[in-house]
Amino acid sequence: MTQIKLIKPTLKYAKDIMEYRQEFLDCGDSMAGCGDLRECSSVEEWIYGINMVENEETCPKDKVCSNTYIAIRLNDNKIIGIIDFRHHINHSILSVWGGHIGFSVRPSERRKGYAREMLRQNLINCKQNGLDKVLVTCDFDNIASKKTIIANGGIFEKEIMVDGDRIERYWILL
């Protein structure tokens, strides 16, 4: 796997961010960890939104504070994934099945180990921000996410049903 780094999204990556978004729209896949990128009509709108949720003073009341990162492949500066971490899960959805971290890897870049490395790097961010454990969830049939979580120390807690979908809950101790 080629090396990657997690960075805060900037307008420098506007074209690649919108191409990333379009790749997900074209394949109909979910965009976990991307905030409201699916609904945004511009990168400026998306970056404004993710900046607003970074601190308590500007975070909308129905959301929790979080940080979002783009995963950049170092050899060509291409976005291969997006990952976030929520500062807490004191929220009716996040405490049940959303968890502390959401992530997605560009469909054309999957099965290359990027998700595992993205999660590993983001766990460092979580620890640096005072968390001692994180909840990470995945759909029961999402084998790739399950392997990624377990490879990063995920300990299976339980399976739950959410709107007819089987969701697995894992805790990672930092």
Image (cartoon, rainbow, N blue to C red):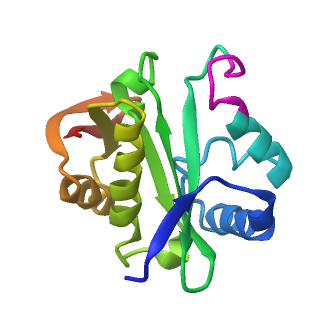
Q: Is residue 166 visible?
A: no
Q: Residue at x 62, y 76 (%)?
A: 78
Residue 76 location, x and y as percent? 61, 85
Q: Nearer the viewer, residue 139 or 65?
A: 65
**Residue 53 lies in the magenta stretch:** yes
Q: Where on the picture, by quarter, is residue 157?
A: top left
Q: Is 51 above or below relative to 153?
A: above
Instruction: Give percent across and percent down for residue 20.
Output: 66, 66
Q: Is residue 3 left or right of residue 154?
A: right
**Quadrant occupied by the N terminus:** bottom left
> Residues in magenta?
52-60
**Is residue 141 shown left or right of residue 64?**
left
- Residue in the picture at 20% in, 59% down: 151
Q: Is residue 9 above or below residue 171?
A: below
Q: Is residue 6 magenta?
A: no
Q: Is residue 2 left or right of residue 161?
A: right
Residue at (56% x, 40% y) in the render: 67
Q: Residue most toward the bottom?
A: 75
Residue 157 visible somewhere in the drawing: yes
Indicate the quadrant containing the C terminus: top left, top right, bottom left or bottom right.
top left
Q: Residue at x 46, y 17 (%)?
A: 91
Count how many numbered circles sit on residues in the image. 0
Q: Quadrant of residue 98?
A: top left
